Image: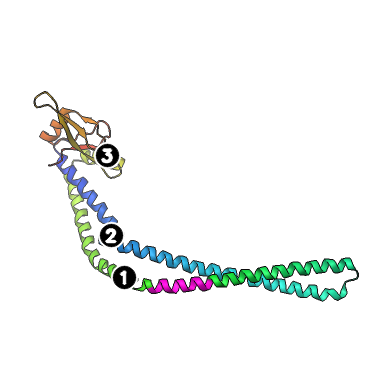
Amino acid sequence: MDGQLSSVTKLQEALTEAADLEVLLSGIPDWMEELHTEHSGRQAEIDALEEGLKAAASERRAAEATEGDCQEKLKGYQEQIGKVRNQREYGALLQEIDTVKDQIRESEDIGLAALEQYESLEKQLDEAKAAFADLDQRYADSLKKWETEKPEIARQAEEVSKTIVELEQALTPRTLAHFKRVFEHHEGNAMAAVRKVQQTGKKGAQIWHCASCNYRVRPQAVVEIASHGNLVLCDSCKRILFIAEV
């Protein structure tokens, strides 16, 4: 694994670029982010209003159905009035009639409230859609523009993929296997820069730390990296160390 640090570093950079391009191709570019957020928010508002309309319509239908059932009950009770045989039965029947009348009034109130809610939401929805039209068109135009840019991004992704293959082939099997283990263990970030922290009182002596975990790096390890391009792991986080160019 000696002397292959440069290739490993380039491989990490290529893999990172490939991942970024993949995310970009499956999403939206930075220049569309603000518009996308606004469009998504306004669309969510319209969707919520439409759901509210459906709920209000459903509630009104349910209230009307309940009222219809109650009207049928009331009709049946009223037909029974002439058939009662005593005061007790008459009183019980009147109580049933009063109860069902209360249910009818309650259903009417619920239906009326649902109708008012429906009309209010319908007005809000019409206004929201009217205000949304221009934004929706701008968003559609931006999407169209993004679709024209995608082929170039896809071409870049393909070129990076070729570079990754070339870099992997340039590494020894042992080095490549070692890199992949570290890469997978750290979820796509196998490298860590070596950072010079301070210079001690002893002339020429320096202190180095791993930029990822801040663990101290042995001076001999820095020499191996700087002079020979060897692959050296951080003693703490186990990433592959490199000295970043200033």
Which SS class for mark 2? helix
Q: Amino acid at mark 1?
A: Ala
- Secondary structure beneath dot 1 equals helix
N-term-proximal mark, 2 vs 3 = 2
Q: Nearer the viewer, mark 2 or mark 1?
A: 1
Q: Position of residue 235 (x, y in %)?
A: 25, 30
Which residue is tagged 2? 25
Kindly identify which numbered label has been placed on residue 18: none
Question: Where is 25 relative to 93, above or below?
Answer: above
Circles 2 and 1: CB atoms closer than 8 Å: no
Q: Position of residue 171 (x, y in %)?
A: 18, 42
Q: Position of residue 20 (x, y in %)?
A: 26, 53
Q: CA distance from mark 2 to mark 1?
A: 17 Å
Determine which of the numbered discs, if any, sits on residue 182 in the image: 3
* Magenta range: 118-130
Asked if residue 96 is positioned above or below residue 208 in the image, the reply reads: below
- Say if the magenta span includes residue 128: yes
Q: Amino acid at mark 3?
A: Val
Residue found at x 79% / y 66%: 95
Viewer-closest of 227 and 159: 227
Foreground label between 2 and 3: 2
Label 1 sits on residue: 140
Nearest to N terminus: mark 3 or mark 1: 1
Q: Give the camera-side residue of 15 and 47.
A: 47
- Magenta span main SS: helix
In which quadrant of the rendered view does residue 202 lie?
Answer: top left
Q: Nearer the viewer, residue 134 or 102?
A: 102
Above or below residue 42? Residue 219 is above
Q: Secondary structure at mark 3?
A: helix
* The quarter of the displayed image where residue 101 is located: bottom right
